[in-house]
Amino acid sequence: MGLFRRNARKTPAAEQASADVKPPTPATSPTPRPSADGRSVTFSDNAAMASWKRKVAEFGLTVAGVEFNGQATYLTLNGPDAERAKEFLREEAVDRKLYYLVVETPDGVWGLDIEGLYLENLRPWQLETESADCRVPAGSIAGSSDSVQMAMRGSHNNFLVWVGCGRCSHRWIDGVRYQTTTLTRCPECGARNLVDSSNITFYVVDEQRSTSPLSVDSTAAPDYSATEERRAQVSARLAELMDANQQHFAGLTEEQKSLASNWRQLDAIIVGAVTGYESPPDWLARIIEIRSIGHQLNREGGARLMTETIAQAERVSQSQLVGAVIPLFWEGIGDWQG
């Protein structure tokens, strides 16, 4: 799911893609992919680019541009109809992290990432639960299980379910809140359906979750949570590291980016189990320190202290992307979930 803030669009996507076209290679989908620097998109060949452009036009969409915030790439399109946008996105394929295909419509911003379809935010009218024409239970989950967990934890305001209209029985995908009611509008007859998601319960099974052994390591380290002054210092340091990483991440190679998001490899480097990193380069040293701070916060105060520190770092960060980007580096640490 897209957790990054999107910036103003400046770079035409499809128009510039021809300059980045790679030699012909077999492709299972014409969906464009981000270029090496993340600032534009590429296609497997000219035929794939032409095919995708035709598909975009057939769905009544237009390309708005490519947005790159230093780590994540957004290919944004505009369209007049949310249902057509969802249909388009469900036929596309995203096969890498930090890449988002987004369609802005008058009825919400819909997106696709490596985990599947998502609604960026509930529309304001969906909270007007007193104006419903009929009440229906939530159908089966239509998005990823991670999106349900995020809605349960309050880190995102919706997850996707199938909705069956109480008036005309039409079925469609829409975003709803977790374990409460959300207003939706039938795209077929216009009936306002109050969807009750209390029939959906998400259970977190810790035994199936892969957790870093460093999360329970008792190695002596600075007490980050000892005083408010110390916590402020740690938050400021985390913000400084994240801002520097945000500035330089785009210049990393694909191999370096892969290492940056491989928490098992990073933890192996931290404990000295991997040779050749005794004096890591600046980009890696920053990421190792970011992850080490996460481990220490987890040992001292668990997910609550980690979350509080992120919020404090966000307030002093220049990029204000700490909360959005930190999931990339703190994966597998204790019970914390970004």
Image (cartoon, rainbow, N blue to C red):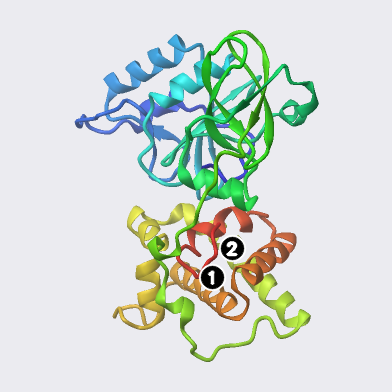
At horizontal 40% and vertical 57% (from top left) the residue drawn is 257
> Where residue 108 sits in the image (x, y, percent)?
63, 26
In front here: 52 or 305?
A: 305
At horizontal 37% and vertical 60% (from top left) the residue drawn is 256
Q: Is residue 280 visible to the viewer in this orientation of the structure?
A: no
Q: Secondary structure at mark 2?
A: helix
> Where residue 124 sits in the image (x, y, percent)?
74, 30
Q: Is residue 191 visible to the viewer in this orientation of the structure?
A: yes
Query: According to the image, label 2 marks what residue?
Result: 242
Q: Is residue 228 above or below residue 210?
A: below
> What label sits on residue 89 in the rendered view?
none
Disc 1 + disc 2, Cβ < 8 Å: yes
Query: Splitting the image into 4 quarters, where does residue 259 fall?
Result: bottom left
| Mark 1 or mark 2: whose residue is earlier in sequence | 2
Q: Residues within 10 Å of mark 2 (few under 14, many from 20)?
A: many
Query: Splitting the image into 4 quarters, where does residue 209 fall?
Result: bottom left
Q: Tell me the kind of residue under disc 1.
A: Ile
The CA span between labels 1 and 2 is 8 Å
Q: Is residue 334 above or below residue 193?
A: below
Q: Residue furthest bottom?
A: 220
In front here: 194 or 251?
A: 194
Q: Residues within 10 Å of mark 1 (few under 14, many from 20)?
A: many
Q: Tell me the kind of residue under disc 2.
A: Met
Query: Splitting the image into 4 quarters, where does residue 251 fall?
Result: bottom left
Dot in front, 1 or 2: 1
Count of numbered circles in the view: 2
Is 300 displayed left or right of 252 in the figure?
A: right
At horizontal 49% and vertical 47% (from top left) the residue drawn is 146
Query: According to the image, label 1 marks what residue?
Result: 290
Is 337 displayed left or right of 212 in the figure?
A: right
Q: Secondary structure at mark 1?
A: helix
